[in-house]
Image (tube, helix red, strand yellow):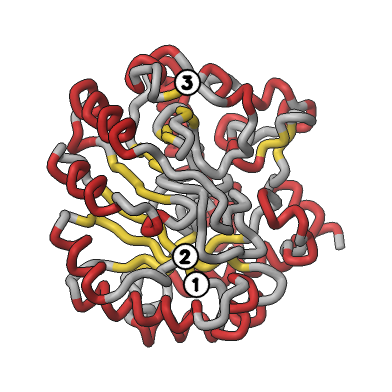
Amino acid sequence: MERDNRLINQKTAVKRGEMLRLASYREYLVSHPKLTYLFVELTDRCNLACLHCGSSCGGSSGRWIDTPLLLGALETVAEDFEPGSVMICLTGGEPLLHRDFFAIADRIHSLGFPWGITTNGTLIDGGTAVRMASLGLDSVTLSLDGLEQTHDWLRRVRGSFRKVREAVEHLHAAGVKVQITSVIHKRNFGELEALYRLMCDWKADSWRVINIEPIGRALQNGELLLSDGEMLRLLDFIREKRYSADTPMDVCFGCSHYLSFEYERELRDNYFICGSGIMVGSILCSGDIYSCLDIERRPELIQGNIARDRFSEVWRDGFRQFRSDRTRLCEKCGECAERRFCAGDSTHTWNFDRNEPMFCIRSVMRKEQSQ
């Protein structure tokens, strides 16, 4: 027992040192932001109507980004930044619904940007997979949120599970590595082990497991949110599978949320850092310049619009709401010994009206331990 405690203390000390260095780097990025990921919302239309959608997308009445306007903005980004160091992530809604998807992807590739796509997978056939691969597709993330009945129920379209399975096959045949993201909620929590076996059978290159968040449409479906105990068991499950000698793929937690000394660096390759406004920017389908696409769409958080503003100038001079210490606004955060590592947790789960995080792993752990 004494030896175990000594090892735990040593591990914690190593983590603390590395996390302090990361905290210093985050503070450096506040005044020296480094655009690393640029998300492009091609449309807020979607062919599904998922019960947990963070952006509340769906239906046929949404918007498309103007193709010439977007391409002009991306050309200025290529001029003002080093293209090879900025990952362009095409998303939506469902990005493959955009009629100019391939023209946009082709131009991104020709400008020298690495690029990827986040998609529900239902529109990927063999030809689509081959064509994306020919345009230098670097990464693709598909969504699978339960076994067949559960996934189709959450996505509100029968047959969507089958189409995801087919998309995986088409992408692998085209030589594209596939990451599958699963949002874990009340209804599929009991399917975790079966989902893991399914990912092994499908030969996923990476399985990214995340918890359902209290944002977007999930706010109207609060019964899907995990309890504190379920959240901790989810983290333990990911850690178990991640380090199992029998696991043939990368299993990781998503980039969201600081996970405390208990879990940091053990569920993903890197320590937590919210890159909103310091590493991550986005262009909405309206042309508005924004930060992380998962953040609540609030007028005061819009930084500009590519129809009138040069993206690099907005990136340099804007994003002030994201380049400050939010923990100073929250009494609970101000009293926390780990506030410098957490920095208020993910911006997409920050309550801007109450100035406090909607998720706090330390609170979750304390509540669970008190029961």
Query: Which kind of residue does numbered mark 1 sit on?
Result: Leu
Tell me the tag on residue 356.
none
Give left or right: position of 264 versus 213: left
Point out residue 123 in the picture as x, y percentages from the top left corner. Answer: 38, 69
Q: Earlier in the sequence, mark 1 or mark 2?
A: 1
Q: Which residue lies at the image location 58% right of the left edge and 58% below the top edge?
A: 59
Question: What residue is disc 3 on?
Answer: 304
- Tell me whether circle 1 and circle 2 mark residues in contact (CB < 8 Å): yes
Point out residue 117 in the picture as x, y percentages from the top left corner. Answer: 34, 55
Q: Is mark 3 on a helix, strand or loop?
A: strand
| Quarter residue 122 falls in | bottom left
Query: Which kind of residue does numbered mark 2 sit on?
Result: Thr
* Label 1 Cα neighbours within 10 Å, binned few <14 / some 14-19 / many ≥20: many
Give left or right: position of 226 versus 11: right
Q: Which of marks 3 and 2 is in front?
A: 3
Tell me the tag on residue 144.
1
- Res. 69 visible in picture: yes
Question: What residue is disc 2 on?
Answer: 181
Point out residue 331 in the picture as x, y percentages from the top left corner. Answer: 79, 26
Q: Earlier in the sequence, mark 1 or mark 3?
A: 1
Q: Give the distance between the C-alpha atoms of the residues marked 1 and 2, in whole angstroms.
A: 6 Å
